[in-house]
Amino acid sequence: MEGAQVSARLGKTNAQVEARVRLAERDTGLLISVLTGGVAREFLLPDARSGSAALVDASDSVVAPMTGVIVALDVAVGDTVAEGARLGVMEAMKMETALVAPRIGTVAEVLCAAGDAVEGGAILVNFEAAAS
């Protein structure tokens, strides 16, 4: 599955996308990063055996879609961002990828800095919990 080409429909408009798949193990399951059009979208498939499958919400975090280096960071703790806003940029294999906000929210933690080498799947930015 790693590196596989996939075709999917995303969002309310049912837009067709072609993408490559990147996998990363997480304590709570399997993180699948789909990179398409310069935007990485993360999907967390919870481990049904963990007992916490119903509690997982990947929209409160932005993770590194691949192993690379953070080359720019555009947010700080307390910043309010719009869905899709650029949070920073990372570089891997001489290609830059924008890190974007998964939803409207306030930045609770920034766990990286420009120049940091990060592993694929590492949490880079956490948002305050979404209001229910």
Image: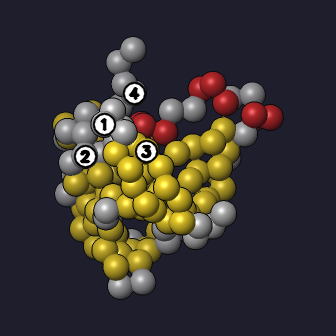
Q: Earlier in the sequence, mark 1 or mark 2?
A: 1
Question: Which residue: 36% across, 39% down?
Answer: 14
Q: Earlier in the sequence, mark 4 or mark 1?
A: 1
Q: Which residue is mark 2?
A: 84
**Mark pair 4, 1: CA separation:** 26 Å
Question: Is 100 left or right of 45, judged from the image as shown?
Answer: left
The 10 Å Cα crowd at callout 2, few under 14, some 14 to 19, many 20 or more, is some
Locate residue 28, reporting x and y percent: 66, 41
Callout 2, which amino acid? Gly
Callout 3, which amino acid? Arg
Q: Earlier in the sequence, mark 4 or mark 3?
A: 3
Q: Which residue is mark 4?
A: 129
Q: Nearer the viewer, residue 51 or 36?
A: 36
Which mark is in front, 1 or 2?
A: 1
The answer, for residue 115, to whether it is visible in the render is no
Question: Which residue: 66% across, 63% down?
Answer: 1
Corner quadrant of residue 87: bottom left
Q: Which residue is mark 1?
A: 13
**On screen, residue 122 above or below 91:** above
Question: Is 101 left or right of 59, judged from the image as shown?
Answer: left
Q: Which residue is mark 3?
A: 9
Question: Which residue: 51% across, 33% down?
Answer: 57
The 10 Å Cα crowd at callout 1, few under 14, some 14 to 19, many 20 or more, is few
The answer, for residue 13, to whether it is visible in the render is yes
